[in-house]
Image (tube, coloured by chain):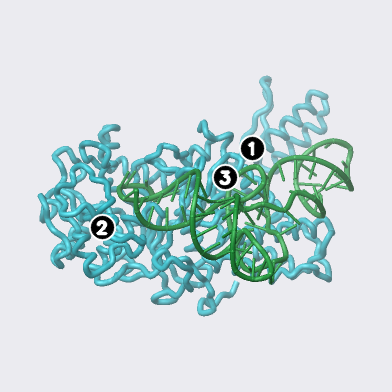
RNA sequence: GGUCUCUUGGCCGAGUGGCUAGGCGCCGGUCUGCAAAACCGCUCACUCCAGUUCGAAUCUGGAAGAGACCUCCA
């Protein structure tokens, strides 16, 4: 596929302007993208799959267009404070205490699980995956910068960003569309915030309470960095003070991303990202699936089927396809019925792909395959509209099946182009894995061998020794050794 | 309470001022030893009320319902 990025017509919805904008990188052909990753204190659930897969598409498509993408997705392994707990303990530390483990063991365990689940769903690894705990020094320096500029203050060993002062010359609310007066008058009064000058101020550094086990030295206190600062700091370090795309879940828009902008404006002198992209939530019974609501289903539950909410196990590719059948900025409601529909649709799609190899070409054609390809590009160029893309792919499915039934004709060139469309859009960009190449292949193979051995056992029962020996010899030539015993037949690979 | 968003056929979900996305399901048919797959056909939806318009599900206003954020959350 030849692509010239100067001809790219990609438009994306920028949360900052609340409209679709043409994508023009700051330093083409290089593109820098930062996405907020998980806080590793629990197993990844369906909600975590949404941004991972949504931005996987963004990165894959940008690369397909010819851009050189540096994709940074962080791991938050410094737990944020739990505000509902009376202790002000952080999430990871709390989990560590409950399980009698070192906090870093918790973070390691769950980040390993996260990686395992993302790999199963064929999510590309980021170029850089920085950890908050590995950038404490940078975060301290970042906080110092803000402190020195006069937009932060120290209070009892903690450092807070002075939002009210910031808002006098800047707009705190530029991203989320709020104005600070509303926020001030309507913010809930929380416990333990006496240190702040204003309720809207947020921590850059928090002094650790005596029982707080995750702590680092700083000029102000032994403590830990505030929530928002890690992203500002690490995006600056790896992508520069001004980069192309910042992504994350919609629930992070305020206050997290809003605060990131404020921090960067003061520390770096400018807003960090040109484009802000936010994926919407996955809902269950119309309500957001979330950790705090306790209504989440983990990815491992989906893969194993072990959950009261699930009728059966679902392949990781089914989950991926399910997510891609909705636009990333829409909510997506989970149900077994919806998931089953995705599973069947995906199966139909993959069967059509397999069929392409055996299509008989004609000298004439009834279909405009190149037009179909153009439609696929148009769909992605329009803010990564994967559901539209998939609708077009199903057009291709119908064409393949009809050609197979001799109801329409395709030329050799048509078939080559059709295959190219599938290879590029389904596999490269949507990132679907061919089911038949996945690890279930091993399982299918073993079941096939068992099936043949069962057939051979029937032959033996009928004293059809010729058939029985033929099957044994054929299996042997394929590398499967059959061993008969009084108990029955077993088998093993000729070469391990 | 404040800010914002959404409301599409049995389900999930796109989208546009006029030309019935797509997937799944249902029903009928072709095919078939049976089944599956496949193909064809059928299912013409857009919360309600009023307005703008030659024409609105799409624009405007109002109502109802749901959700998100405002506090950790992808």
Q: Single out the mark in the foreground, 2 or 1.
A: 2
Q: Which mark is residue A446?
A: 1
Q: Residues within 10 Å of mark 2 (few under 14, many from 20)?
A: many
User: Which residue carries the number 3 mark?
Assistant: A439
| Residue located at (83% from left, 71% from top) | A364
Point out residue A124 in the picture as x, y percentages from the top left corner.
47, 57
Q: Chain of mark 1?
A: A
What residue appears at the point 83 percent right and 67 percent down from the top-left corner? Answer: A362
How crowded pointer 3 is (Cα within 10 Å; few <14, some 14-19, many 20+) is rated as: few
Q: Nearer the viewer, residue A452 or A245?
A: A245
**Residue A291 in picture, x, y percent from top left:** 39, 41
- Position of residue A143 in the picture relative to residue A80 (left or right): left
Q: Secondary structure at mark 3?
A: loop
Q: CA distance from mark 2 to mark 3?
A: 40 Å
Earlier residue among tags 1 and 3: 3
Which residue is labeled 2 in the image? A229
Mark closer to the observer (2, 3) = 2
Sequence-wise first label, 2 or 1: 2
Q: Quadrant of the C terminus of chain A?
A: top right
Quick one: SS at disc 2? helix
Query: Looking at the picture, does residue A83 appear above or below residue A119?
Result: above
């Amino acid at each position: 596929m030849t692509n010239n990025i100067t001809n790219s017509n990609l438009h994306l919805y920028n949360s900052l302007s609340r409209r679709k904008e043409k994508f023009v990188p700051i330093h083409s052909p290089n593109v820098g993208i930062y996405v907020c990753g998980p806080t590793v204190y629990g197993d990844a659930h369906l909600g975590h799959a949404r941004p991972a897969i949504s931005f996987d598409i963004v990165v894959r498509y940008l690369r397909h267009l010819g851009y050189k993408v540096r994709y940074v997705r962080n791991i938050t392994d410094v737990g944020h404070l739990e505000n509902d707990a009376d202790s002000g303990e952080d999430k990871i530390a709390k989990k560590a205490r409950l399980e009698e483990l070192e906090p870093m063991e918790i973070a390691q365990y769950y980040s390993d699980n996260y990686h395992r689940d993302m790999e199963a769903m064929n999510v590309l690894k980021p170029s850089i995956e920085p950890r908050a705990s590995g950038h404490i020094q940078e975060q301290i320096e970042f906080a110092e910068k803000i402190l020195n500029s006069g937009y932060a203050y120290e209070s009892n060993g903690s450092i807070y960003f002075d939002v009210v002062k910031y808002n006098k010359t800047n707009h705190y609310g530029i991203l989320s569309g709020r104005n600070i007066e509303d926020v001030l008058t309507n913010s809930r009064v929380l416990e333990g915030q006496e240190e702040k000058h204003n309720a809207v101020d947020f921590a850059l550094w928090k002094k650790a309470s005596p029982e707080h086990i995750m702590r680092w030295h700083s000029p102000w206190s032994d403590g830990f960095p505030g929530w928002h600062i890690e992203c500002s700091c690490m995006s600056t370090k790896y992508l520069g003070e001004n980069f192309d795309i910042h992504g994350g879940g919609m629930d992070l828009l305020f206050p997290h991303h809003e605060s990131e902008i404020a921090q960067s404006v003061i520390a770096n002198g400018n807003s960090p990202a040109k484009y802000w992209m936010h994926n919407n939530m996955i809902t269950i019974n119309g309500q957001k699936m979330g950790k705090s609501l306790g209504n989440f289903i983990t990815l491992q539950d989906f893969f194993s089927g072990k959950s009261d909410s699930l009728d059966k196990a679902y392949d990781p590719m089914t989950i991926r396809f399910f997510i891609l059948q909705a636009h990333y900025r829409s909510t997506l409601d989970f149900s077994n019925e919806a998931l089953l529909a995705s599973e069947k649709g995906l199966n139909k799609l993959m069967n059509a792909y397999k069929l392409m190899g055996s299509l008989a070409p004609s000298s004439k054609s009834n279909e405009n395959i190149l037009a179909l390809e153009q439609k696929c590009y148009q769909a992605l160029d329009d803010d990564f509209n994967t559901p539209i893309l998939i609708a077009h792919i199903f057009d291709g499915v119908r064409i393949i099946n009809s050609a197979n039934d001799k109801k329409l004709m395709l030329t050799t060139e048509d078939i080559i182009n059709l295959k190219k469309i599938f290879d590029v859009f389904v596999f490269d960009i949507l990132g679907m894995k061919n089911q038949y190449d996945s690890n279930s292949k091993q399982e299918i193979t073993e079941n096939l061998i068992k099936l043949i051995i069962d057939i051979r056992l029937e032959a033996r029962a009928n004293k059809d020794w010729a058939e029985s020996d033929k099957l044994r010899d054929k299996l042997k030539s394929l590398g499967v050794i059959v061993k008969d015993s009084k108990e029955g037949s077993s088998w093993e690979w000729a070469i391990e």
